[in-house]
Image: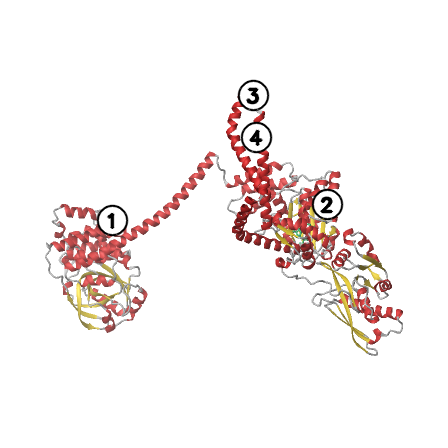
Amino acid sequence: MLKALTSSCLQNRFHAVTTAFTPQVRRGTDSNTPLLRVLGSLRSSNRRVPYLSRRFFCSDSTDGSESNSEAAASEAKPAEEGGDADSKASAAMVPTVFKPEDCLTVLALPLPHRPLFPGFYMHIYVKDPKVLAALLESRKRQAPYAGAFLMKDEQGTDPNVVSASDTEKNIYELKGKDMLNRLHEVGTLAQITSIKDDQVILIGHRRIRMAEVVSEEPLTVKVDHLKEQPYNKDDDVIKATSFEVLSTLRDVLKTSSLWKDHVQTYIQHIGDFNYARLADFGAAISGANKLQCQQVLEELDVHKRLQLTLELVKKEMEISKIQESIARAIEEKISGEQRRYLLNEQLKAIKKELGLETDDKTALSAKFRERLEPNKEKIPVHVMQVIEEELTKLQLLEASSSEFNVTRNYLDWLTALPWGNYSDENFDVLRAEQILDEDHYGLTDVKERILEFIAVGKLRGTSQGKIICLSGPPGVGKTSIGRSIARALNRKFYRFSVGGLSDVAEIKGHRRTYIGAMPGKMVQCLKSVGTANPLVLIDEIDKLGRGHAGDPASAMLELLDPEQNANFLDHYLDVPIDLSKVLFVCTANVVEMIPNPLLDRMEVISIAGYITDEKMHIARDYLEKATRETCGIKPEQVEVTNSALLALIENYCREAGVRNLQKQIEKIYRKIALKLVREDGEIEPQNAEVGEVEAESIHLSDEIKSKEEIQAGAESANGSNDDKASENNAEAEAQGAPVNQTQKSANEDACLQDTQETEKATESEASKTVNKVVVDSPNLADYVGKPVFHAERIYDQTPVGVVMGLAWTSMGGSTLYIETSLVEQGEGKGALNVTGQLGDVMKESAQIAHTVARTILLEKEPDNQFFANSKLHLHVPAGATPKDGPSAGCTMITSLLSLAMKKPVKKDLAMTGEVTLTGKILPIGGVKEKAIAARRSDVKTIIFPSANRRDFDELAPNVKEGLDVHFVDDYKQIFDLAF
Ligand SMILES: Nc1ncnc2c1ncn2[C@@H]1O[C@H](COP(=O)(O)OP(=O)(O)OP(=O)(O)O)[C@@H](O)[C@H]1O
């Protein structure tokens, strides 16, 4: 029904006060009069309260002053027409012939937020048309009064919790009795000063109490007018309380500027001062909740009312203090930050003025130029041109723009590259050889190739970039030899792996326009090594990914090809860079997997793997040494016997490389380290005992006795030496004979040295016996566990139908058996089953072998119908490992023939070779790996295809040593050798 002011209560209050008094202020009163001055005058004039004689302009006591009010109203009129709420309030001063005390029946208007205090104005919104009509009617009848009653909260709601919209909504819906029940009994007789649309402005006049309902719609009630209880104006307690209220108001005024206007306005009208009004004023402007205000309104005992008000303003005082401290804290924080900012700006300006600091752009340009300075002559012209252009551009760009950052990063890369900056190469072949030998055992091919490279460089005076590809099984030292080559050549080393690389941008960089664009690996490499002729190791080139956008292999080609890479163009850098001086070393496990155009440009050096002998050397001279150092163990503290090392290699690490061997050695040394540390802890007391025992025996033994004597002699000699020294010196000086003394002291020194040496020797011997750990083959399992590798050799002497073959895998060479057995026999039942995860080629190879074996058997034993009438099963263990390739052809034939003829093959024989249907033997790959694998399995005789004779001849003598190798063209030769 009614809509109260929508702004906060507090604002309403202050607004109300201000507007109520504004006309009076305008009438020329000094608006700057501070409360302090008033209060000062209060106190200075013997507390005579002169203002008591004045009248409060809109109090009940103004009843007779119609002309005054009228004047106020006429003055305020233009403002009201302007729609100004303040001036509307002034219009409320219009007096009527109808006196307030005559008003006994009034319309009841509900106030949702606060009660209306006498002397204050409030505007409300009346939504009910009937009420609005009644109000207009009463104004017309010159009885413009209504009763303003505060609404009670709905039961169960907290008066401190504001939910304005709810309250207002409920008000519009309430009518008649319901409304009556929700209104407080005591309210204020309010003069209706103006009605504009649904906004009604009320001025409170006097307290009233509802007596009875006259009509329900609109709610009209009969009221009793309430008067304050009589009180003694000179009562000291009342006076003191009122002073306290005033002084609290003064304090609030000091802290809260919000109150200033209202309190000052009040002070200007303090002429109408009385204690009851003061109490009302304090309560009205306080931020107390509506119930507390209502309490003040209902209180007719002036002293009690003053006390209630005092409580409220005191509370207000506390709130304003908190407000002040919050404001101060925030202010401090903000001003601190501002101060800092200002100081920083000033500092920058001062530095700039003094020339200590230039702005960002100039500083950046200077940094880039400084970087270029040492190499300026070596930078290619076209690159220098681009750099200059970019530097100019940088000056023109706004420092906060994204383009600026792009240009800055670009210049950063361009200027950081080692243009024409080469490391001094080592062309000393002997030194290089020494370095290579220091790092790796064997690998003669690789070392030889590197030495050749250095020799060419020496003769030409410069070395050209080359691509070397090291291929071989894992752990044979491909990567580590790369590092060693760099050391030998005195080139910087950079390694990156291209295994699984599928993005061309990794090699050639992104275009600069992309966010987060980066140059490719090669540019990154040059920046990081700082020279233009590093050794770049490209690891796992056989595992290069297949890109979805662009082909990484083709990008690699541009990078590696000596014809193209003198002008390698990185997408990011966008200026050609010369990579022709870079030495590329690639590593691969399977050469066949390297894209052909790439392979074509490489010089492949294959490292086949190591035989036991080589592994022994590597383990002893390289791996053990390095591991011992990393574990912090001294050589005298440990001994790994040859037999232990051999057992380790033969039973635990039979693969081609030495990585596993390295791991096992590390395992042994870690265990030894633990053992030594543990023993040290336990031994300490034991050591002490040993020391004591030794000390005792020292006393007993003659030898040591003499030692003691020597020592004692030495000590006494030493002592006498000290004593006599001065005398002798004096004598020498006096007699000029220093020789005597020198000889003596020389003898004594020798004696002392002897004693100390003997002591040291006994000490180190004692420590040796106590702390040395010996690893031998019997206790090897304590360090590395039981052998995990089961010998490749399943049979000592192969039975009928079983023959040993030689295979090649990416892990190196290995031996494998071909087993054939008879399933069933019967007329025309000849057939062959194959198992062992064989690939298509190997299956076909088995079919061919079956046919060839049948032909050969018929040749050798024309009556033997074994193959025609036998169902056979051919198996290649181990069944879990997939196998493929044609090189087991001759082994399969031999196995089939052995079964057919019921004859085992020669002992310790292994063979490899592809067979044609006519029995011709074709060459195979991996001769070195196969030879090494054969040696590992103690094979004595090997059969290789004749075409592989050259490969075998090239092998190192230690690989060939002890092998009886036969080269064959035709299967018949194998037949003769095997059976
Ligand atoms: N001939 C050797 N002399 C001394 N140490 C060697 C020799 N060969 C290999 N090693 C050592 O073996 C370890 C393994 O070598 P590396 O990592 O270079 O193998 P890799 O062939 O690159 O293997 P992958 O193909 O798995 O990358 C290294 O610590 C290396 O020093």
Q: CA gap, disc 2 to disc 3? A: 69 Å
**Residue sitting nearer the eye, 484 or 538:** 484
Residue 352 in the image, given as x and y percentages of width and height: 47, 37
Q: Residues within 10 Å of mark 4 (few under 14, many from 20)?
A: some
Q: On screen, 713 above or below 790? A: above
Residue 118 in the image, given as x and y percentages of width and height: 19, 60
Q: CA gap, disc 4 to disc 1? A: 99 Å
Q: Quarter of the image containing the N terminus?
A: bottom left
Q: CA gap, disc 1 to disc 3? A: 105 Å
User: Is 527 positioned to the left or the right of 81 in the image?
Assistant: right
The reply to whether callout 2 and callout 3 are in contact (CB within 8 Å) is no
**Residue sitting nearer the eye, 923 or 706:** 706
User: Which residue position holds label 1?
Assistant: 254
Res. 143 image quadrant: bottom left
The residue shown at (43%, 41%) is: 345
Q: Residues within 10 Å of mark 3 (few under 14, many from 20)?
A: few
Of the image marks 2 and 4, the number of the one nearer the N terminus? 2
Of the image marks 4 and 1, the number of the one nearer the N terminus? 1
Kindly tell me whether residue 482 is visible in this rendering.
yes
User: Is 546 positioned to the left or the right of 128 in the image?
Assistant: right
The reply to whether callout 3 and callout 4 are in contact (CB within 8 Å) is no
The amino acid pointed to by label 1 is Lys
Q: CA gap, disc 2 to disc 4? A: 59 Å
Q: CA gap, disc 1 to disc 2? A: 93 Å
- The circle on residue 736 is 3
Q: CA gap, disc 3 to disc 4? A: 17 Å
Q: On screen, 258 above or below 212? A: above
User: Which residue position holds label 2?
Assistant: 450
The amino acid pointed to by label 2 is Ile
Of the image marks 1 and 2, the number of the one nearer the N terminus? 1
